[in-house]
């Protein structure tokens, strides 16, 4: 009897059951791609790793990274998108639309206003109020605020960037103690790497040496090499934040400020009180005021020169100049600086919107206008009100503006 | 040292490398030294305390073991009994001194002033300054010592090697907030030669990064919300109060189970297994089940060393209920030196009694038994159990009874919300919780049998080559530190 041999069953089963295993290298690459994608999306949704929003800039030292998303949690909270021109503002056309008047506001982090929702910073409040009051034309208030900006940077920004937007009014922020920005900072850090002006007794001279030194430094080279990642990757932001924290921890450890394993802050024994140095010179309030007065006087010629250059630039661009002055969280006024500013303004013929009295009054009444350093919502609302109050008398705004 | 600190990130890899490079015979000594370095990085002098307690308990257990001669009645000799009681009292007294002195003094002062008021006495007691800093983890290692002495007293073999005992007492992955180990289980692991086990190491890394995520990405981000709610109990709105409470429920779970995961993960990477402490407690369908799944090592410790010695359920239903309430009240007191913890523990005891009573009643009633077997009823049981447990957490978290009552009032009477609700949009915790929920569904529910499709997805999404696993672990760790707030927070259970 012929015997028909069947194929062994086990073998078939084995073949089917054997799992198809992807090559390990391919599997690893796929996991890496998936992990990067998931992390980027998660961090973007949560607004993490967005703390780097400044990039080195050839002209101004540094500027906002265009089209960058920023979630601000240090003081207050806001989720913002820097526009394609590198402004903390909505997208603005370079060419001024017909029937529109533009106010360009230049300043530091107080104007940049990362701490509050964009719709509630003083620039936006002023824009809204002007448009609500004036039906004849459209008003645009352009925000050119950049963290830590000095008057020198504002002048250069006005010349090279703001002018392209054809503003009708240029508003320069000059808060209390802004003159101290002229004290030379030789720290060779990113924020110190900017153009400065020296006064030789006759005229101002631009100096970009600190920018060149910083650019050659390891930090400068790292910034240059990682510019794309800094602008586009959330993971990069998280990693650099971690590295920064680890470096801070390490420096604290080697300098003795931090103790190994002492992170149990709430449970740990109190740190020894700061030792008072017997040889330290403690300034009396009078002496401190005198020092501040002298510092303001010493560096004022630079401010004065810059204001003249800014006024000349505004005249060249056929726009009006106005200076906005207000208090800081830690200081209401610097009377000497205020006096010098008034003199300069009278000399060159530009108005000053002085919000210091309003800030002083509100604080005396118990209003809370600042987070730790910057304006909170109330601070922005107060400054907007002050600007709108002064706007008619200072730069001839429509008479029906009634904030 | 915190598991979620940069110090530990440096410390642990060094210890791990030295441990696996060292010859087997040196490893225990190395771990012992590392454990003391870990502990003493906080307040070095407290290393002396744990060392002294270790030496005393080690010597006592050896003497108890040596003198254990049973009398004709079968009970241990008077000397053994005396030494045992001395040991237990010593451990409890040390714990009480460091943990409860402040509470006792405060209560005495209040009582004195209260009586003086009632009887019109011209006495006014002032609160003296009690400046005793609680040594980290004392509640945990004191409980381990008590368990050790009790078991040796009951006839178990003690640990003879001083290094072995020192390591049992100070093993850094479980030193500060448990899990509360059982020495028999740990001794068995110490007695065998430790060989590197890839699968165990892999599981350890997974647990470590998972715990890190739970702690820093979820629990730490919830702290501002919870603190804002419980610090403003007089002004919080209804939504504020509920968000703060639910936030605390998630925070305390992620904080403690995250710590346990990190501890167990670190131990596994060193070749040791630590007991499981949490088994998805928020899926419990009764209070009884909850305590079998929440802080399991404490619940079992209380069962074995308080409830059973008190008589357990052997002497009738009334005694059983009494013992349950006493045990849970002690459990509440263990959590902290404050009356709201005691009341919380007492209420948990009462809830357990009601649970037992209802269970017995349901067993006798056929329709109730049938009702409980229906899936919707099971879901409802989980919902009600969790609601009950979370509501009890108000007592647990509030600073005092007044704040707790204010919180309950805010939860159950309508008030407009502005305190916690306003902080919510700025907090990345919801995204972190969503990410963890997906992760837990895929990887953390071993006993959960989902749809076959999900099972297939789960197996597909489990990397099985080392570089791919490394990518996943690195990503979870990066996600954890990415979501973490700027400064690390200590674990909640450190204060216990």
Image: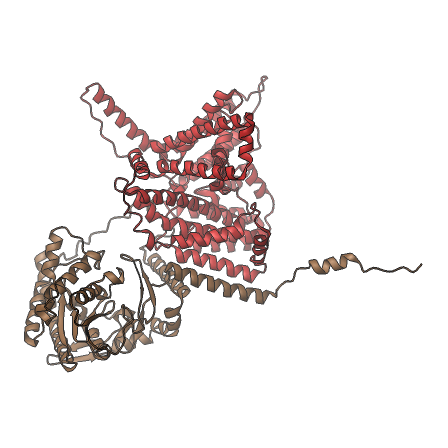
Question: Residue A139 versus residue A57: which sits nearer the camera?
Answer: A139
The percent position of residue A376, horizontal first and vertical second, equals 22, 57
The residue at the point 5 percent across, 73 percent down is A346
The residue at the point 60 percent across, 44 percent down is B192
* Rendered position, B361 above or below B295: above
Residue furthest out toward the front: A135
Residue furthest out toward the right: A1
Residue furthest out toward the bottom: A316
Residue furthest out toward the top: B72
Question: Residue A385 versus residue A54: which sits nearer the camera?
Answer: A385
Question: Residue B189 versus residue B300: which sits nearer the camera?
Answer: B300
Say whether residue A187 is left or right of residue B290.
left
The percent position of residue A286, horizontal first and vertical second, equals 7, 58
The percent position of residue A47, horizontal first and vertical second, equals 36, 60
Q: How many marks?
A: 0
The residue at the point 40 percent across, 60 percent down is A43
The residue at the point 51 percent across, 40 percent down is B168
Quarter of the view holding residue B251: top left
Say whether residue A229 is left or right of residue B20.
left
Say whether residue B24 is left or right of residue A348.
right
Colour scheme of this structure image?
by chain
The percent position of residue B488, horizontal first and vertical second, equals 37, 51
Say whether residue A74 is left or right of residue B287.
left
Q: Is residue B144 visible in the rendered structure shown here?
A: no
Chain A color in figure: brown
User: What quarter of the picture does the C terminus of chain B occupy?
Assistant: top left
Q: Is residue B400 visible in the rendered structure shown here?
A: yes
* Rendered position, A165 above or below B132: below
Chain B color in figure: red
């Amino acid at each position: 009897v012929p015997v028909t041999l069947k194929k062994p069953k086990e073998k078939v089963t084995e073949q089917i059951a054997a799992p198809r295993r992807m090559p390990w290298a391919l599997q690893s690459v796929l996991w890496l791609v998936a992990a990067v994608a998931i992390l980027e999306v998660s961090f973007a949704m949560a607004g993490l790793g967005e703390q780097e929003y400044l990039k080195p800039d050839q002209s101004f030292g540094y500027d906002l990274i265009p089209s960058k998303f920023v979630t601000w949690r240090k003081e207050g909270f806001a989720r913002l998108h820097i526009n394609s021109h590198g402004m903390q503002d909505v997208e603005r056309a370079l060419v001024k639309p017909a029937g529109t008047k533009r106010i360009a506001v230049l300043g530091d982090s107080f104007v940049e206003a990362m701490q509050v929702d964009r719709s509630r910073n003083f620039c936006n409040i002023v824009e809204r109020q002007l448009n609500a009051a004036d039906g004849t034309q459209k008003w645009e208030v352009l925000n050119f605020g950049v963290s830590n900006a000095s008057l020198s940077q504002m002048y250069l920004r006005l010349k090279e960037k703001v002018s392209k937007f054809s503003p009708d009014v240029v508003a320069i922020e000059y808060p209390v103690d802004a003159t101290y920005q002229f004290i030379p900072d030789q720290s060779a850090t990113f924020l110190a790497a900017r153009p400065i002006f020296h006064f030789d007794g006759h005229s101002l001279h631009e100096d970009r040496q600190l920018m060149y030194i910083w650019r050659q430094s390891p930090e400068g080279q790292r910034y240059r090499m990682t510019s794309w990642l800094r602008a586009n990757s959330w993971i990069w932001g998280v990693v650099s934040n971690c590295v920064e924290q680890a470096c801070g921890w390490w420096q604290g450890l080697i300098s003795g400020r931090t103790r190994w394993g002492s992170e149990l802050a709430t449970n740990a024994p109190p740190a020894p009180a700061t030792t008072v140095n017997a040889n330290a010179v403690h300034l009396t309030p009078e002496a401190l005021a005198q020092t501040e007065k002298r510092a303001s006087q010493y560096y004022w010629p630079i401010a004065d020169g810059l204001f003249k250059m800014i006024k000349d630039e505004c005249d060249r661009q056929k726009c009006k100049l106005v200076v906005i002055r207000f208090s800081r969280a830690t200081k209401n006024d610097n009377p000497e600086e205020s006096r010098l500013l008034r003199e300069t303004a009278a000399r060159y013929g530009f108005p000053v919107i002085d919000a210091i009295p309003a800030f002083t009054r509100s604080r005396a009444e118990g209003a809370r206008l600042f987070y730790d350093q910057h304006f909170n919502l109330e601070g922005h609302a107060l400054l907007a009100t002050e600007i709108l109050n002064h706007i008619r008398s200072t730069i001839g705004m429509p008479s029906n503006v009634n904030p | 040292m915190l598991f979620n600190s940069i110090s530990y990130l440096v410390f642990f890899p060094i210890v791990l490398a030295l441990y696996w490079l060292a010859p087997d015979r040196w490893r225990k000594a190395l771990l012992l030294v590392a454990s003391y370095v870990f502990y003493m990085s906080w307040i070095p002098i407290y290393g002396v305390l744990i060392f002294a307690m270790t030496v005393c308990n080690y010597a006592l257990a050896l003497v108890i073991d040596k003198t254990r001669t049973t009398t004709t009645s079968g009970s241990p000799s008077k000397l053994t009994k005396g030494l045992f009681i001395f040991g237990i009292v010593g451990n409890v007294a040390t714990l009480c001194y460091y943990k409860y002195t402040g509470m006792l003094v405060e209560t005495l002062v209040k009582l004195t002033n209260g009586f003086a008021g009632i009887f019109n006495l011209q006495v006014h007691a002032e609160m003296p300054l009690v400046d005793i800093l609680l040594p980290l983890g004392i509640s945990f290692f004191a409980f381990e010592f008590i368990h050790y002495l009790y078991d040796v007293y009951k006839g178990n073999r003690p640990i003879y090697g001083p290094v072995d005992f020192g390591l049992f007492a100070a093993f850094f992955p479980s030193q500060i907030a448990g899990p509360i180990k059982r020495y028999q289980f740990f001794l068995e692991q110490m007695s065998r030669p430790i060989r590197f086990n890839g699968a165990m190491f892999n599981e350890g890394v997974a647990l470590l990064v998972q715990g890190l995520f739970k702690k820093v990405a979820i629990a730490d981000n919830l702290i501002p919300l919870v603190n804002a709610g419980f610090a403003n109990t007089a002004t919080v709105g209804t939504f504020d109060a509920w968000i703060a409470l639910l936030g605390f429920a998630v925070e305390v779970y992620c904080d403690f189970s995250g710590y346990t995961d990190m501890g167990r993960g670190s131990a596994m990477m060193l070749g040791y297994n630590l007991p499981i402490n949490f088994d998805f407690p928020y899926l419990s369908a009764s209070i009884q089940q909850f305590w079998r799944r929440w802080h399991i090592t404490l619940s079992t410790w209380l069962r074995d060393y308080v409830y059973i010695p008190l008589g357990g359920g052997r002497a009738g239903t009334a005694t059983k209920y009494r013992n349950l309430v006493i045990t849970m009240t002690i459990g509440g007191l263990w959590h902290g030196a404050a009356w709201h913890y005691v009341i919380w523990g007492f209420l948990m005891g009462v809830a357990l009694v009601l649970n037992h009573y209802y269970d017995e009643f349901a067993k006798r009633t056929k329709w109730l038994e049938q009702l409980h077997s229906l899936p919707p009823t099971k879901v409802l049981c989980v919902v009600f159990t969790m609601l009950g447990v979370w509501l009890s957490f108000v007592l647990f978290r509030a600073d005092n009874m007044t704040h707790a009552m204010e919180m309950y009032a805010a939860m159950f009477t309508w008030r407009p919300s502005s305190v916690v609700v306003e902080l919510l949009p700025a907090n990345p915790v919801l995204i972190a919780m969503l990410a963890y929920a997906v992760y837990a569904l895929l990887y953390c529910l071993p006993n959960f049998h989902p749809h076959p499709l999900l099972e297939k997805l789960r197996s597909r999404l489990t990397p099985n080559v080392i570089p791919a696993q490394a990518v996943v672990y690195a990503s979870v760790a990066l996600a954890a530190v990415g979501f973490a707030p700027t400064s690390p927070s200590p674990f909640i259970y450190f204060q216990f």
